[in-house]
Amino acid sequence: MRKRMRKRNAVSVVATAVLAATAASGTPTAAAGPRTVRGPVEFSVKVVSVNGSGCPVHTVWADAWPEKESFRVVYSEYLAQAGGSSRPIDSRKQCQVAVQVNFPQDVTYAVSSSDHQGFAHLESGASATVKVGHYIQGQPWDGAVTHNLNGAYDDIWRFTHRLPADQLVFRPCGEDRNTVLITELRVDKGTSDPSKTSYIAMDAVGEGVWTTYHLTWKSCP
């Protein structure tokens, strides 16, 4: 049985996790210093496909925030765990979500940063990792970034992944391509008490806990 000792009232008083970030391999190819513009007044986003052990069908949804030039993705069953009664396959969960962003044809976008958050309960000696990345279908992938969290820990975690302006990869003007969002959660029980469960989650534990993708826009010819 999954052991989830969540402090749901911790959403209002959040202690930010100290996360060590290490860039993984992969360097995108993109034009340097694109001239950006204000995003459209209205645009929409929808999930077109999901794949992976961390996101069963009907457990992921997305919506647009035009006023913030971003969109959010919410997971409802995304958790990895180790120790206790956990199975070996429970220690790693991954998810690949393809989203379709619809907007006026005189502009296009690139994902310039993403905010990730969730909850973790790690026994002393246990550790967890979060891997994130994204790419536009048919375009170079910006590579993955891995963030680490060590026990003992029992709180909300969060981090932001930002791309330099000269590494932004824009969706080609006039082409209908999806953006693919890749995430992975891992837990290693390490030297912790094997009878106790450690876990990390990237699902909604309360109001305001989701993944946000911020967009940079530019004009199309």
Image (cartoon, rainbow, N blue to C red):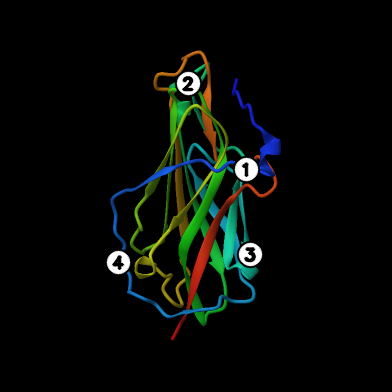
Callout 1 crowding tier (Cα within 10 Å): few <14, some 14–19, many ≥20: few
The quarter in which the N terminus is drawn is: top right
As measured in the structure, the alpha-carbon distance from the residue carrying label 1 to the one carrying label 3 is 23 Å
The amino acid pointed to by label 2 is Arg
Q: Residue at x 35, y 66 (%)?
A: 167
Q: Are the two marked residues, 1 and 3, in contact with CB atoms closer than 8 angstroms? A: no
Q: Are the two marked residues, 2 and 4, in contact with CB atoms closer than 8 angstroms? A: no
> Which residue is identified by label 3?
65
The amino acid pointed to by label 4 is Thr
Q: Decide: is 187 above or below 43.
A: above
Which disc number belongs to residue 14? 1
Q: Decide: is 194 above or below 23.
A: above
The quarter in which the C terminus is drawn is: bottom left
Which disc number belongs to residue 87? 2
As measured in the structure, the alpha-carbon distance from the residue carrying label 2 to the one carrying label 4 is 40 Å
> Which residue is identified by label 4?
29
> As rendered, which of 179 and 146 lies closer to the eye?
146
Q: In the rendered structure, which disc, 1 or 3, sits on the residue that comes first in sequence? A: 1
Q: Is residue 141 left or right of residue 66?
A: left
> As rendered, which of 73 and 103 lies closer to the eye?
73
Label 1 element class: loop
User: Which one is closest to the eye, mark 4 or mark 1?
Assistant: 1
User: Which one is closest to the eye, mark 2 or mark 1?
Assistant: 1
User: Which one is closest to the eye, mark 3 or mark 2?
Assistant: 3
Where residue 96 appears, as percent x and y from the top left, is: 47, 48
User: Which one is closest to the eye, mark 1 or mark 3?
Assistant: 1
> As rendered, which of 53 and 154 lies closer to the eye?
154
